[in-house]
Image: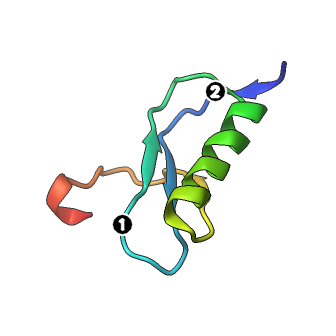
Amino acid sequence: MKGYLPDRNLIFFNPGNKGVIFVLPAKQYISVEQLLKAQECLVERTTNPVIYIEDRRVKQRGPRDI
């Protein structure tokens, strides 16, 4: 089973909409199947497209900045 171990958080969000839907913490192994299933689940819940990126920020945002 192939997977991914991100160095930084994986951020899931709806393109064009403000805010984050889900964050997968860094250094947590996730298989490709699990990643696609999580994305599919979030699409069903939000009824909008969901994409994810590896967080590139050096300074993390606080809860009020999201």
Tell which of 59 and 44 is nearer to you: 44
Split into 4 quadrants, where in the image is the N terminus? Answer: top right
SS of the residue under disc 1: loop
Which label was assigned to residue 32? Answer: none
Residue beneath label 1, please? 19
Residue beneath label 2, please? 5
Query: Where residue 9 sits in the image (x, y, percent)?
Result: 47, 40
Q: Is residue 2 left or right of residue 31?
A: right
Q: Is residue 30 above or below residue 48?
A: above
Query: Where residue 43 sits in the image (x, y, percent)?
Result: 60, 59
Q: Is residue 61 above or below residue 25?
A: below
Q: Is residue 42 above or below residue 19?
A: above
Query: Where residue 21 sits in the image (x, y, percent)?
Result: 43, 56
Q: Quadrant of residue 34?
A: top right
**Distance from the alpha carbon under mark 1 to that under mark 2:** 24 Å
Task: Name the residue: 83% across, 24% down.
Answer: 2
Split into 4 quadrants, where in the image is the C terminus? Answer: bottom left
Q: Quadrant of residue 37?
A: top right
Q: Earlier in the sequence, mark 1 or mark 2?
A: 2
Q: Amino acid at mark 1?
A: Gly
Q: Is residue 59 left or right of residue 7?
A: left
Task: Name the residue: 60% across, 62% down.
Answer: 50
Tell which of 52 and 39 is nearer to you: 39
Q: Amino acid at mark 2?
A: Leu
Q: Is residue 25 above or below residue 29?
A: below
How many numbered marks, from 0 up? 2
The single residue placed furthest to the bottom in the displayed view is 16
- For label 1, count other residues whose C-alpha is less than 10 Å away and answer few (under 14), some (14-19) or many (20+): few
SS of the residue under disc 2: loop
Task: Name the residue: 58% across, 71% down.
Answer: 48
